[in-house]
Amino acid sequence: MYRIKRLFIIATMVASLAVQTLAIAEEGESALDRIRERGVLEVAVYTNFPPFSYRDEKGRIVGIDADIARAIAKSLGVAAAIRSVGADESMGDDLRNNVWKGHYLGGGVADVMLHVPYDAAFAKENDRVIFVAPYYREQVVVAVEKGQGANLDPLEYFSREKVGVELDTLTDFYLLTAYNGQIRNQVVHFPNIGKAVVALKKGDLAGVAGPRSEIEFALADNYTDYAVGPVQMPGLRNSGWDLGVAVKQGNDALAQAVEKAMTELRQKGSLNEIFAQYHSTYQLPSRLRLAKVE
């Protein structure tokens, strides 16, 4: 009896899974059509995250990701409805809240989300989402006074000079632990890179470490006064990461359309132009750089 009951449950689960799979397939086939019918592509970007997404003086969401979102929507023949979302405890939570399920407080999900890691291991852990259209390679760099540059010895320089970082970030954690903690007392914490760069410009710091795009944006017109570049530090295996777009699993037609749109933006030079508007250097994702070399 128990065996029959167990087989019945398994059969029911398989049937249910088949129905769900069919529903997902149908959703994937019609998601792009529904977007075009309503004339709007809903795109999730992070709140207060310059230079990628932030509000200008008029309250409009602007930034690199916002401009890319509008360019993708235009390529699809629709308008962009940009949704500003806060970061949860993990990127997996952000994907759940904004792409495939929705927040428990309501609000629904967006059609796509920008500024998500484009990484095979991460994608495997988050299989309810399709990761497509890698568009930028972020990189940890250090900005110091002109003349230091490639000759900078991090241990020698930052053991006597102050370096600013954003609190609770990869860069922060690394500098506190690098060289067996020999430079941890020289690390100064700030709520964001922008405030750290302000301190650098005032002469309160000798350097600022963090993502290239954020540092370059904050330096703005003063960029030529500083040397900005990666610094080889022991123990830091991966000082960069690719950014891409997340689409709900099953929405294959939409994912392909976004991939195509991003490829066209890159080939036309539009991505370079967008990044340049925000004083940021455009860098090809690692996958595309390797393909170019090959």
Image: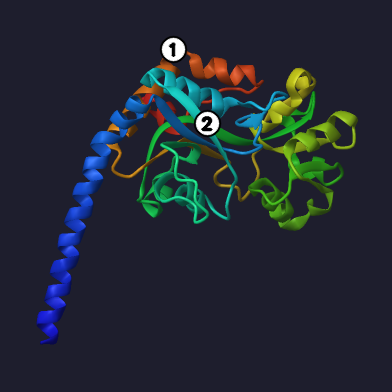
Three-letter residue code for mark 1: Lys
Q: Earlier in the sequence, mark 2 or mark 1?
A: 2
Label 1 sits on a secondary structure element that is loop
Report x, y in % for residue 242.
Answer: 49, 36
Snapshot quadrant of residue 206: top right
Report x, y in % for residue 180.
Answer: 72, 58
Q: Which residue is mark 2?
A: 82
- Please tell me which residue is depicted at 44% across the width and 43% down the height of the picture: 109
Q: Which of the labelled discs sits on residue 223, or is there none?
A: none
Task: Name the one closer to the observer, 129 or 197.
Answer: 129
Report x, y in % for residue 63.
Answer: 61, 26
Report x, y in % for residue 192.
Answer: 74, 41
Q: Which residue is mark 1?
A: 268
Q: In the image, 233: left or right of 240?
A: right
- Please tell me which residue is depicted at 39% across the width and 45% down the height of the picture: 120
Looking at the image, how many numbered discs can be counted on the residues?
2
Tell me: residue 165, above or below residue 12.
above
Q: In the image, 243: left or right of 202?
A: left
Three-letter residue code for mark 2: Ile
Q: CA distance from mark 2 to mark 1?
A: 23 Å
Task: Name the one closer to the observer, 197 or 16.
Answer: 16
Tell me: residue 262, above or below residue 99.
above
Locate the C terminus and report the quarter of the image it occupies: top left
Task: Name the one closer to the observer, 21 or 255.
Answer: 21
